[in-house]
Image (cartoon, rainbow, N blue to C red):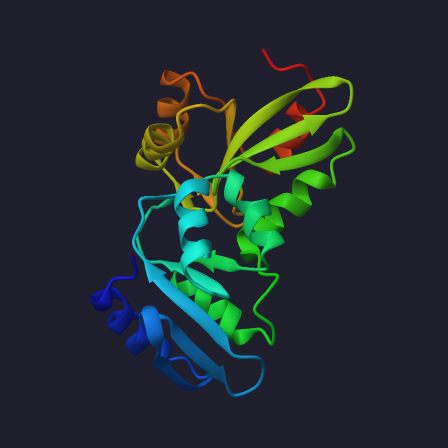
């Protein structure tokens, strides 16, 4: 399941990290990373368009890993894998995510800073009782005395027309889009496309206001 070419590519990238003292490929194509400071990390390299419970189960059953590296750009991570991997104390993500984990002293827990920022912002709202991750972009917001809503969050610095079209193509089913980057901007074309697709597009202040109301 682990591809030799991916593993060799990943090994070269891993060795470039300043906190790595050594890295080598051992049995079954697993990469073992020794940090300058901290515990070692066992990494498996994969290229999935979508990480779901089925392929994650296969990986966990087949390999002893601390981090699942998925090099596929734009991959979808289904919500069902988050609690499963947390139960197994396994982190996952892209090469940049692995770099951040290497910079930590421990392999788990790991949560991408952008996700952490959005979750914290939503949970601070007085109407929000719980936030569930449906995949790597969509969040189900459970509200007190109001129906739940599903948003898709984008951290793009500039949210433009193509940003909106791609979110709609990739994730399809949601109630609104949150432009979550606090220093970002939303173009007029983005608003036009969102309106054409009948999907509300909000910044943080607009979303906070709308969370107090019944959505149509």
Q: Which residue is at a point 56% across and 57% down the rendered structure image?
A: 113
Q: Is residue 173 left or right of residue 165?
A: right
Name the spot of residue 95 as percent of width and height, x first.
Answer: 38, 64
Whether residue 52 is visible, yes or no, is: no
Coordinates of residue 144 in the picture (x, y in percent): 77, 24
Q: Residue at x 35, y 24 (%)?
A: 193
Q: Position of residue 177 (x, y in %)?
A: 49, 30
Classify 117 as above or below 99. Answer: above
State which quarter of the image contains the N terminus. Answer: bottom left
Location of residue 153 in the rendering, given as x and y in whole percent from the top left corner: 50, 38
Q: Nearer the viewer, residue 28 or 20?
A: 28
- 13 over 80 or under it: above or below: below
- In the rendered image, is residue 143 in sight? yes
The residue at 67%/31% (across/down) is 208
Quarter of the image where one finds residue 47:
bottom left
Q: Is residue 213 above or below residue 162?
A: above
User: Residue sitting at 67 percent across and 14 percent down?
Assistant: 214
152 versus 35 height, above or below? above
Q: Quarter holding the C terminus?
A: top right
The image quadrant that residue 119 belongs to is: top right
How many marks can you see? 0
Give left or right: position of 175 versus 196.
right
Taking the view exactly as shown, the residue that stands out farthest to the top is 216
């Amino acid at each position: 399941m682990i591809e030799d070419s991916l593993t060799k590519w990943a090994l070269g990238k891993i060795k470039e990290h300043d906190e790595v003292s050594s890295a080598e490929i051992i049995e079954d194509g697993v990469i073992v990373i020794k940090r300058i400071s901290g515990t070692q990390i066992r990494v498996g390299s994969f290229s999935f368009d979508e990480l779901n419970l089925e392929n994650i189960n296969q990986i966990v059953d087949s390999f002893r890993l601390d981090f699942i590296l998925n090099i596929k750009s734009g991959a979808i991570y289904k919500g069902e894998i988050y609690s499963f991997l947390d139960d197994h104390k396994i982190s996952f993500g892209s090469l940049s995510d692995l770099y951040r984990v290497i910079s930590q002293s421990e392999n788990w827990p790991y949560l991408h800073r952008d996700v952490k920022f959005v979750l914290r912002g939503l949970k601070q709202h007085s109407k929000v009782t719980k936030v569930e991750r449906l995949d790597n972009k969509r969040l189900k917001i459970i509200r007190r005395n109001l129906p739940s809503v599903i948003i898709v969050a984008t951290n793009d610095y500039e949210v433009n027309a193509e940003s909106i079209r791609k979110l709609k193509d990739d994730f399809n089913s949601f109630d609104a889009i949150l432009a979550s980057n606090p220093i970002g901007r939303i173009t007029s074309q983005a608003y036009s496309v969102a309106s054409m697709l009948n999907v509300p597009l909000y910044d943080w202040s607009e979303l906070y206001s709308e969370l107090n109301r019944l959505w149509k």
